[in-house]
Image: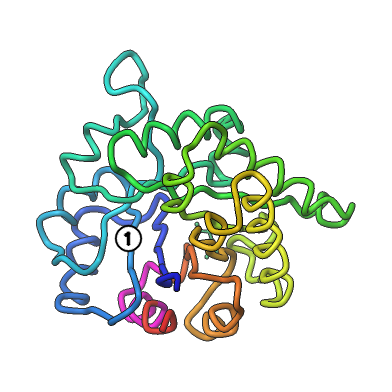
Amino acid sequence: MRTPIIAGNWKMNKTIVETKAFLDEIKDFAVDGVEAVLCVPYTDLAIVKENIGDYIKIGSQNIHWAETGAFTGEISPLMLKELRVEYAIIGHSERREMFGETDETVNKRVHAAFKHGITPIVCVGEKLEEREAGKTKEIVKKQTIAAIKDLASEQVKQLVIAYEPIWAIGTGKSSTAEDANEVIGFIRQVIADQYDQQVANEVRVQYGGSVKPENISTYLNQPEIDGALVGGASLDPTSFKSLVEGGK
Ligand SMILES: O=C[C@H](O)COP(=O)(O)O
């Protein structure tokens, strides 16, 4: 039985003052049987660590493969560990499209995260033109295989994958729940082919792309979908709480 996981990705939103106001609204919030994560900007990690209880886990929006060094603008796993970060989003389409992230660097970051006890949330997903050309499965297969290259079975079992069709991110156009379920089932099959069915059965795969409190249950009711990676709708505390409740 896979525990549903709802993760908010704040992207480049919220100052420390705004973050503190958000945290004041979610004090003592917890939902049994659902894991909740907030992936906040680096500048907000310390305030989140100081003001959050044990229930909501802290996530980062990236992680570098080196522990220290000349990597201007990057963030080290050691720095994240000190801030009680337990999850790291890796290979988000915005990183792939705007900041030169490749399948190879995604794999290096995934290995570094595991080395430091941080769980990767690996994002995969196709562009609109790829979907229209019937290449969705080809793209997600390639991205998934590259991301998990050389991982041990035990690591793959702990992994979280977020299937985010790029055309559905921040556009208000969401994939249908049935479509998302089919692609996520396919991702699980890719993992079964690379490892085995038991490993594939344990990996949690989220859907992401215009998920809101109003539509989250349609996704979570699907058998293959284990949670959601949510951008815009995770920024408001009431909405975030509803999303986590929708994970039940
Ligand atoms: O990481 C989250 C996704 O990019 C989805 O963003 P969105 O919920 O604003 O569409």
Residue linked to disc 1: 38
* Residue at the far left in the pictured view: 50
Q: Residue at x 78, y 54 (%)?
A: 136
Q: Where is residue 15 in the image (x, y as percent from the top left)?
A: 26, 53
Q: Mostly what secondary structure, the magenta segment?
A: helix
* Residue in the image at 66% along x and 54% along y: 166
Q: In this rendering, is residue 198 above or below 79?
A: below
Numbered-mark total = 1
Q: Is residue 112 magenta?
A: no
Region rendered in magenta:
234-243
Of residues 74 and 143, the one drawn nearer to the viewer in this rendering: 143
Task: State which quadrant residue 182 falls in.
Answer: bottom right
Which residue is drawn at the image coordinates 47% and 38% (left, top)? 152
Q: Where is residue 156 in the image (x, y as percent from the top left)?
A: 48, 47
- Crowd around label 1: few <14 · some 14–19 · many ≥20 (10 Å): many
Q: Can residue 142 be seen in this view?
A: yes
Relative to 107, is 171 on the left or the right?
right
Q: Position of residue 8 (x, y in %)?
A: 40, 63
**Furthest residue to the top?**
70
